[in-house]
Amino acid sequence: MTSRPPSVRASNVRTQKTKQPSSGARRAAGKPGKSSGPAWRRWALCGWLMLALWFGVEAARLPDVGALRTQNPRTTALMEQRAEEALETGTKPRVRQSWVSLGAVAPHAVDAVLISEDARFYKHEGVDWTEVENAFEQSVREARLGRGASTVTQQLAKNLYLSTDRSLLRKGKEFLLARQLETHLPKQRILALYLNVVEWGEGVYGIEAAAREHFGVSARALSVAQGAMLAAMLPAPRRWLPAQRPETLRTRAGVIIGRLEREGRISAAQAREAQAELSRFFAAPPTSGWVAEAS
């Protein structure tokens, strides 16, 4: 039997040797993700540093809220935004606002707003982290963005200084401003400012203007049912108008009255009377406009 020439065998051996990777190459090939971990950590660290830098810059640029201790703002960022929106549609901006003290507002109306918007107002320092956690857990369970968790202080910060957009940067500024407000102002002053600047219908700002606009009475004279309806309007103050008798407003107001009773803010008799007034109000046909205009 004839064998292949030596030259051919030597050629095959050389070819096989060139096909086998070196031991160093084998070690490198066996660890493809070795450098990915440190790179990911570096990017995460850069992200945190940038976030900390942003917070530092924004904190240095915060407006001076200390003046709000004794001075009422002549306008707010929300009022200016609504005025611009009106002008863009060729409409004259409408503003109804009358400043009042907390003592000039029916106590059950104040309680209705707090129960509706920020039940833990006197227990947090601007941001209610318990409520934030609950809202986050609800969003995870339902796989969608759930209810908001903004406190009265956060809403005041947004109304005074920010826009209505929902960006994360705006939310970050809102947190910073809320902390500033809580640091420089007493709780009662924060609540008084909120009740006087919050939106309660198109061009209607503050509870005094809202009471006169929607019910033709002063904030001091608001009934339990009327206070509950004003509180129920706040998530959508330009859509859930009492004059239009929306069922959502009726449902929310009824729930607020029930909570006022359960928490001892009103008696059982007051709750029954308020629920009866609510039924009478919504049994009436919707009106085409507002009840009255504040001066």
Image (cartoon, rainbow, N blue to C red):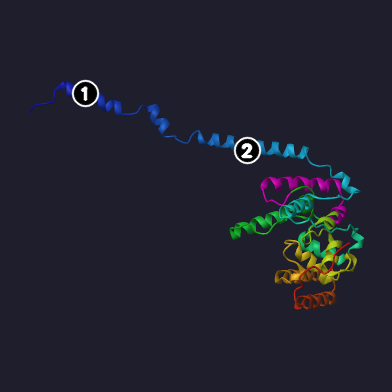
Considering the whole magenta stretch, tell me its main secondary structure.
helix
Q: Which residue is mark 1?
A: 11
Tell me: residue 90, above or below residue 41.
below
**Residue 96: image location, x then y, percent:** 84, 59
* Residue 26 shows in the view: yes
Q: Which residues are magenta?
A: 163-192
Question: Closer to the camera, 179 or 103?
Answer: 103
* Residue 263 shows in the view: no
Give me the residue at 67% from left, 48% from top.
Answer: 167
* Residue 14, quarter of picture: top left
Give me the residue at 80% from left, 61% from top.
Answer: 114
Instruction: Name the outermost residue toward the left.
Output: 1
Is residue 178 part of the magenta span, yes or no?
yes
Label 1 sits on what residue type?
Ser
Regarding mark 1 in the picture, which secondary structure is present there? helix
Q: Which residue is mark 2?
A: 47
**Residue 97: image location, x then y, percent:** 85, 58
**Residue 50: image location, x then y, percent:** 66, 36
Label 2 sits on what residue type?
Gly
Q: Quadrant of the N terminus?
A: top left
Is residue 273 part of the magenta span, yes or no?
no
Question: Closer to the camera, 7 or 139?
Answer: 139
* Residue 106, quarter of picture: bottom right
Between circles 2 and 1, the one closer to the viewer is 2
Q: CA distance from mark 2 to mark 1?
A: 56 Å
Numbered badge on residue 83:
none
Tell me: residue 175, above or below residue 61.
below
Q: Residues within 10 Å of mark 1 (few under 14, many from 20)?
A: few
**Residue 193: image location, x then y, percent:** 85, 54
